[in-house]
Image: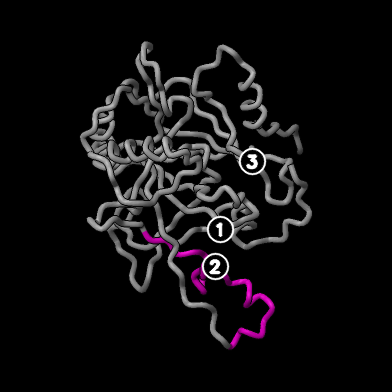
Amino acid sequence: MWGATRPKKNLFIAAINLQNNLIALNPFRSFLSNRGHTAFHLIQQPDLKSHSVLEAQAVFQLPDFSGALEDYFTRARLGISTFTIAGRRSASHTHEFPFKVHVWSKVAIQGRQFHNLLLPNDIRTIFATPPSPDSQWKFGRNDCVLLNIDDEKEWPHSSLEGHCVAIVKMIFSLSYPANHANRPGADRFLAYCERFDTVNQPPPPQQYAHLPCYQAWKLYYPDYFSGCYVLRKALRSSGAPFGDVIPISQFRAQVAVAPRLRNTADIHLTPYNVMTYASEYLLNKFWDKELWYAFENADPCSSPAL
């Protein structure tokens, strides 16, 4: 028997309606990316409220957090609108800030369908919880996202070009005192993310060069056997993870990252520690059909423009 189907929730409509609400909380709990192809939603109240920067830094075990915040403000003052996870850390890690940090444990994200940009995708939830030694998520529950780092490239039709993969370690907003005149960064949600680098793999064997699809392997070479891109954690010269503060509006999609296992699998790896202990990963394009279309560079000719 077939019954009525439940309509898919549309975060795009919620975000547009909220823009006209004069009494809505700032930053808006529902909002759009710059080009309007991705929608976001957070619950009204934060999970951790009114923490100092150093307190949040300690809870999430991110010694780089305060320096990343200072670098974020420096780049914003220079007029940068699209932020990247790159560059040397120029600020002190003990800098005092005039605001408190509100922390959220998750954010809902919704994109548009690859072959019809008028239709929304399913909603995904991105988690970013702190380490908890007394739970199974000992190292924290942290999902991976695709970040836009080039205004000229727009997901999903740009595929991986102009984007990078990152793991979300903290989702937060800034809360200034009521009498504080200048409030940079208080109008948006931010995230501390750590970058993955895409590692080029050997191209397909020359014996297949005569095939039409051989020339489609460009920009980045994925793993030949799985067809998935190979990722490795980006590290600073000190060996620390390469992290920075990024506006959530630069998120484009949640992605699945799986450990790249060779020969013998490490028996100590579990779903709860693999993002900490594995050295190489595969960007799993088979996790979602819309991701598969994007990473396979499927023909978007039938997609209407917005």
Residue drawn at 56 percent across, 58 percent down: 161
Q: Is residue 111 left or right of residue 106?
A: right
Q: Which residues are magenta?
A: 207-232
Question: Can residue 47 be seen by looking at this rendering?
Answer: no
Q: Which residue in the protein does label 1 denote?
A: 161
User: Residue 173: horizontal and vertical position, in percent?
Assistant: 41, 27
Secondary structure at numbered mark 1? loop
User: Residue 70: horizontal and vertical position, in percent?
Assistant: 32, 36
Q: The residue under label 1 is which amino acid type?
A: Glu
Q: Quadrant of residue 269?
A: bottom left
Q: The residue under label 3 is which amino acid type?
A: His
Q: Residue furthest bottom?
A: 207
Q: Is residue 240 left or right of residue 283?
A: left
Image quadrant occupied by the C terminus: top right
Residue drawn at 37 percent across, 63 percent down: 280
Q: The residue under label 2 is which amino acid type?
A: Leu
Q: Is residue 32 magenta?
A: no
Rendered view: 202 above or below 144: below
Estimate how packed mark 1 is, as few (under 14), some (14 to 19) or many (20 or more) residues with alpha carbons within 10 Å: some
Residue drawn at 54 percent across, 67 percent down: 219
Secondary structure at numbered mark 3? loop
Do residues under tags 1 and 2 come within 8 Å of each other at their CB atoms?
yes
Q: Quadrant of residue 199?
A: bottom left
Do residues under tags 1 and 3 come within 8 Å of each other at their CB atoms?
no
Disc 1 from disc 2: Cα separation: 8 Å
For marks 1 and 2, the one nearer the N-term is: 1
Q: Which residue in the protein does label 2 denote?
A: 219
Estimate how packed mark 2 is, as few (under 14), some (14 to 19) or many (20 or more) residues with alpha carbons within 10 Å: few
User: Residue 44: horizontal and vertical position, in percent?
Assistant: 48, 20
Q: Which residue in the protein does label 3 denote?
A: 37
Residue drawn at 51 percent across, 74 percent down: 224
